[in-house]
């Protein structure tokens, strides 16, 4: 997977460099306006395919690594959520690059772009959705344990079943009410109505429904994985990252 990631990354970088140089020497070059309109443009379709392959292989490769504060995958759906989380992490870095490009273009060369702000908004909306799935997998969403911790184990299991049942009910209601609208927006690839005119409504609305289903599956996976575990007791110390504290302490000692 590492070799595939490197290979697709190199090919994507080479094609991007070619397109960038072509914009300087050709009047019929492919720019950002054309990148979201691939119909009849094989080069754009190839670029989008390479970007997708690079993101997929990078996400799969990075999902094998585990940070010190991350919970180990123990559910049937955890690997999928970890892959999606790595995709969100890569997307955050991409947002930074896009905004950096915009700042340099605007304030150094006095040539602001029409697409940087909307592209950042587009990517950030997907990051926000995928972050919810990752939070569910890590059990790091907001949970109040004051009453939960004093319950006997059978009552904790009952509370967990009720919680997952409410999540499933919410998901069902959201899909029931939003499916037709999301389908209409997707089929006509509804755009944003700006100069660059990206299909943000046509892609984000279906993504909301898809990712909320993934969050629900992850919640069910958590319920099954935690069913036979021993009772846990929680405190404020659970939120302390000992590894990060040690890194800060080492940095301060080195700077003395």
Image (tube, rainbow, N blue to C red):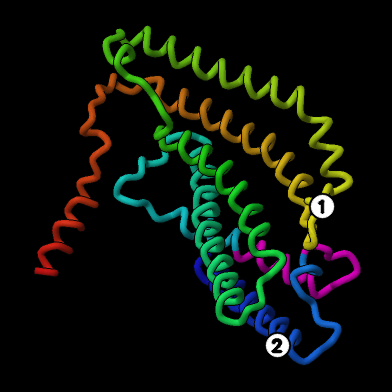
Q: Secondary structure at mark 1?
A: loop
Q: Are marks 2 and 1 in contact (CB under 8 Å)?
A: no
Question: On the picture, is 157 further left or further right than 77?
Answer: left
In the rendered view, does 156 fall on the left or right side of 236? right
Q: Residues within 10 Å of mark 2 (few under 14, many from 20)?
A: few
The answer to whether residue 121 is above or below residue 46 is above
Q: Between marks 2 and 1, how big is the CA–CA gap?
A: 29 Å
The number of numbered discs placed on residues in the rendered structure image is: 2
Please state the horizontal and vertical placement of residue 84, each as a whole percent of the image. 55, 48
Tell me the chief SS of the magenta region. Answer: helix
Q: Residue at x 52, y 19 (%)?
A: 164
Locate residue 32, reporting x and y percent.
Answer: 74, 70
Which residue is the extreme one toward the bottom? 25
Q: Residue at x 60, y 76 (%)?
A: 105
x, y (%) of residue 136? 47, 34
Which comes before the other along the chain, label 2 or label 1? 2
Depth order, front residue of 255/73: 255
In the image, the segment drawn in magenta is 36-54
SS category of the residue bearing label 2: helix
- Residue 21 is tagged as 2
Is 209 rendered above or below residue 231?
A: below
- 178 over 123 or under it: above or below: above
Residue at the (10%, 64%) spot, across then down: 253
Location of mark 1 (residue): 193
Crowd band around label 1 with a 10 angstrom C-alpha radius: few (<14), some (14–19), many (20+):
few
């Amino acid at each position: 997977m590492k070799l595939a990631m490197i290979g697709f990354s190199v090919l994507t970088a080479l094609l991007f460099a070619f397109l960038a140089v072509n914009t300087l020497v050709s009047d019929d070059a492919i720019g950002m306006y054309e990148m979201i309109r691939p119909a009849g443009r094989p080069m754009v379709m190839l670029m989008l395919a390479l970007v997708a392959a690079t993101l997929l292989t990078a996400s799969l490769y990075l999902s094998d690594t585990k940070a010190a504060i991350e919970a180990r995958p123990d559910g049937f759906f955890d690997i999928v959520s970890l892959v999606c989380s790595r995709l969100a992490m890569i997307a955050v870095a991409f947002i930074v690059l896009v905004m950096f490009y915009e700042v340099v273009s605007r304030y150094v060369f006095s040539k602001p772009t029409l697409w940087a702000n909307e592209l950042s908004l587009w990517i950030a909306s997907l990051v926000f959705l995928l972050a919810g799935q990752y939070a569910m997998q890590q059990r790091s969403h907001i949970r109040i344990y004051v009453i939960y911790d004093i319950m006997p184990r059978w009552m904790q299991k009952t509370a967990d079943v009720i919680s997952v049942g409410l999540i499933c009910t919410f998901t069902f209601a959201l899909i029931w009410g939003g499916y037709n609208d999301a389908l209409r927006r997707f089929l006509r690839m509804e755009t944003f109505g700006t100069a660059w005119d990206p299909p943000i409504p046509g892609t984000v609305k279906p993504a909301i429904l898809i990712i909320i289903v993934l969050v629900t599956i992850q919640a069910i996976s958590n319920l099954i994985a935690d069913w036979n575990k021993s009772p846990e007791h929680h405190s404020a110390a659970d939120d302390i990252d000992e590894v990060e504290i040690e890194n800060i302490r080492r940095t301060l000692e080195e700077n003395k």
